[in-house]
Image: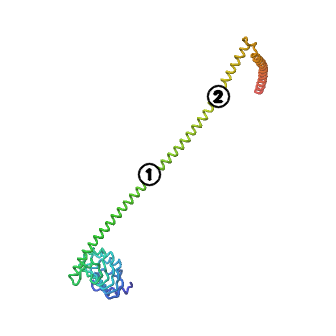
Amino acid sequence: MSKSKVLNLKDKMNGNEMDLSLCNLSEVPVRELAAFRKATVLDLSCNNITSLPPEFCKLTHLVKVDLSKNQLTCLPDDLGNLGNLQHLDLYNNKLSGLPVSFSQLRSLKWLDLKDNPLELELAKAAGDCLDEKQCKQCASQVLQHMKDVQEEVDKVREKRFLKEREQEKKRDAKQREREAKEREVRKQEKAEEKERRRQEYQTQMDAAADKKAAMESAPKLGRSLIGLLIKLLLLLLLGLAAVAAACQLTDLQREGACVPVNAALGEGLTWARRQEVVVRQLVEDWSTTAKELLMKSTQASEN
């Protein structure tokens, strides 16, 4: 608002009253009115105001407000903040109800709600408002009615709060249950995985043990077979020696069966004598070679 309009507002001041009636207003100049703290009486009647802005509820210095003969269809939710308001004229508007906070206007002593399309219960509480006495009764009865409405709203809100809280508890319980099941599943999976690894480890250990046992048993089996063969060979040699002794030292040497045995024995002894000569010659050669090598190493060390 320009400075000239502010000056016009000042021109509308008369003591503690701000008269803005018949100004063809479609909205309330709340920001400008807030500067006039001494204007405790505000007349906005006979205009084209359809609603009050939320900021109107900050004009807590107001004691008397005339909004009659406008086009109001609703009032701001925080109207109850006007704690000093004693006189409120809402005659001839289009109001069907009042905000729940209306019950907080504890200083209200006078109220006119005539010629408004009020809800049935509110209309009964408001009465006719035909004179000063009825307007005072209207203020008292409407305040009580709005207090009842406030209590009912509080009950509904409390029920809704308790219901939401109960639902939240159920959701939390379900969430905890779901988390517990998930933890149990994870625990079971870990246990199964651990058991699987344990079985794999045991299988590997068993396989290693079987392999080791097989490797250890193979040499034993080989040694046992060799030992058995040696025993059989010794028995065979003993048997042959016994046969040879029988054929050489007993009367059986003239038997036909001993003839090849004696022949083989003779040939074997001859071969052994020959080998003895060969071995003796080898030993002599080795001894001569060793002496020569020893002499050469001795001479080399002396040089």
Q: Is residue 252 left or right of residue 175?
A: right
Q: In this view, does 277 lie to the left or right of 130?
A: right
Which residue, given by chain and number where applicable, does mark 2 sit on? 225
Secondary element type, mark 2: helix
The residue at 72%/16% (across/down) is 244
Q: In this view, does 6 lie to the left or right of 286?
A: left
Which residue is nearer to you in this view: 239 or 25? 239
Q: Quadrant of residue 278?
A: top right
Which residue, given by chain and number where applicable, does mark 1 sit on? 184
Q: How many marks?
A: 2
Image quarter (top left, top right, bottom left or bottom right) of the C terminus: top right
Q: Does residue 12 appear anywhere in the picture?
A: no
**Is residue 181 placed above or below 6 in the rendered structure?**
above
Which residue is nearer to you in this view: 66 or 206? 206
**Is residue 262 placed above or below 135 in the rendered structure?**
above
Secondary element type, mark 1: helix
Which residue is nearer to you in this view: 170 or 8? 170
Indicate the position of residue 76 as horizontal and vertical percent values.
33, 77
Q: Quadrant of residue 1?
A: bottom left
Sequence-wise, the earlier of marks 1 and 2 is 1
Disc 1 and disc 2 in contact, CB within 8 angstroms: no
Indicate the position of residue 70 as horizontal and vertical percent values.
32, 85
Q: How crowded is mark 1: few (under 14 residues within 10 Å), some or many (20 or more)?
A: few
**Is residue 125 placed above or below 252 in the rendered structure?**
below
Extreme top residue here? 251
Q: Distance between the residues labelled 1 and 2?
A: 60 Å
Indicate the position of residue 300 as horizontal and vertical percent values.
77, 27
Q: Residue type at mark 1: give it.
A: Glu
Q: Residue type at mark 2: give it.
A: Leu
Q: Residue 244 carries which label?
A: none
